[in-house]
Amino acid sequence: MRELAGLVGDGGVVVLSGAGLSTESGIPDYRGETGRARRADPMTYQTFTTSAAARRRYWARSHVGWRHMGRVEPNAGHHAVARLERLGLVDGVVTQNVDGLHQAAGTRRVVELHGGLDRVACLKCRARIPRTELDDRLKAANPGFDAAVGPINPDGDAVVPDELVAGFTVVDCTGCGGLLKPDVVFFGENVPQPRVDECFGMVAAARLLLVLGSSLAVRSGRRFVDRAEALGIPIAIVNQGPTGGDGQALLKLDAPLGQTLTALAGGPAFNTSRGTAV
């Protein structure tokens, strides 16, 4: 912790956060302890766009899961990151999460690498609407639909019996009739290049890349660690369990995120003028 405080206390920190940061809010991760309880494979872009049955299944499950995801609150880890930003130590956050919890905790500069579940996009006219608006439309289209919230998956959907899925009505864009999709990057879909470039720019300007709760098992997040290493920018990782970037890190802490970050941001390690390590 003293070494981590020293690195963060120099400022210029860019955070790369993953699903492990949100597990204490009740959202399971993909590959850690909570991710092992997944009941289904994640939806792919190709399946979603080519199969009406797959879209019905997705929206039925996601409609139920939104009851939980829409009420999830930031945990101590999110609040600690926001405090580090207020102290002038964190310059920005690149998050692989789609839950919006960094923003809910008060962090101002957040790039959602994979988008956000609180928005819905039309694949034809590209219009975007709030998820709450779609939720109201789905409730109206499925007045008899009643499924208890089962286990929630990391991407926000829930386990729903097949017999209930079969009777679920999907709604389309009110403007053009196009297919509606959550404004998130599905597996098999590319992150928009301008968003990737913005993230690379943040990393290039950083004095420290701080990875929080990411296994770095896929290229989507690992590429930013690779870029930091190539630029000679030190990397620190806080995660429970091994990550794909452990060999590249100057410092690795295998520890609970909420407890560790709260101690870092709220303890005596920083003064309030700049957050300088003491």
Image: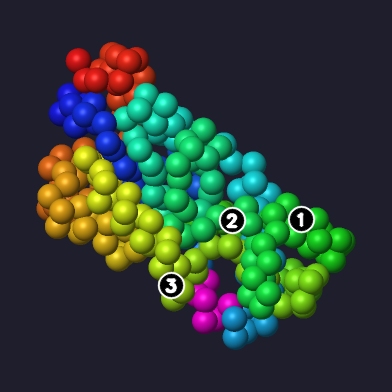
Say whether disc 2 or disc 1 marks the residue closer to the N-terminus: 2
* Mark toward the viewer: 3 or 2: 3
Q: Which numbered marker is on residue 133?
A: 1
Q: Which of marks 3 and 2 is nearer the N terminus?
A: 2
The Cα–Cα distance between marks 2 and 1, rounded to whole angstroms, is: 12 Å
Q: Which of 186 and 166 is in front in this view?
A: 186
Identify the amino acid type marked 1: Glu
Judging from the image, the colouring scheme is rainbow
Helix, strand or loop at label 1? It is: helix
Residue at label 3? 190
Q: In terms of sequence position, does the residue under pointer 3 or pointer 1 come before the other?
A: 1
Residue type marked 3? Asn
Q: Which residue is drawn at 45% across and 51% down?
A: 111
Q: Give x and y (percent) for residue 263.
A: 32, 23
Q: Which label is found at residue 15?
A: none
Q: Which residue is drawn at 36% across and 19% down?
A: 266
Whole-angstrom CA distance, mark 3 to mark 2, is: 17 Å
Residue placed under numbered mark 2 in the picture: 117
User: Which x, y percent locates residue 127?
Assistant: 68, 67
Residue 74 in sight from this viewpoint:
no
Residue 104 seen:
yes
Q: Residue at x 21, y 29 (%)?
A: 10
Residue 270 to residue 247: above or below: above
Secondary structure of the residue carrying numbered label 3:
loop
Q: Assign the C terminus to one quadrant of the image.
A: top left
In the image shown, does 100 or 259 lie closer to the viewer? 100
Per the rendered image, the range of residues in magenta is 43-48
Is 91 part of what is drawn in magenta? no
Residue 106's place in the image compared with 237, above or below, is above
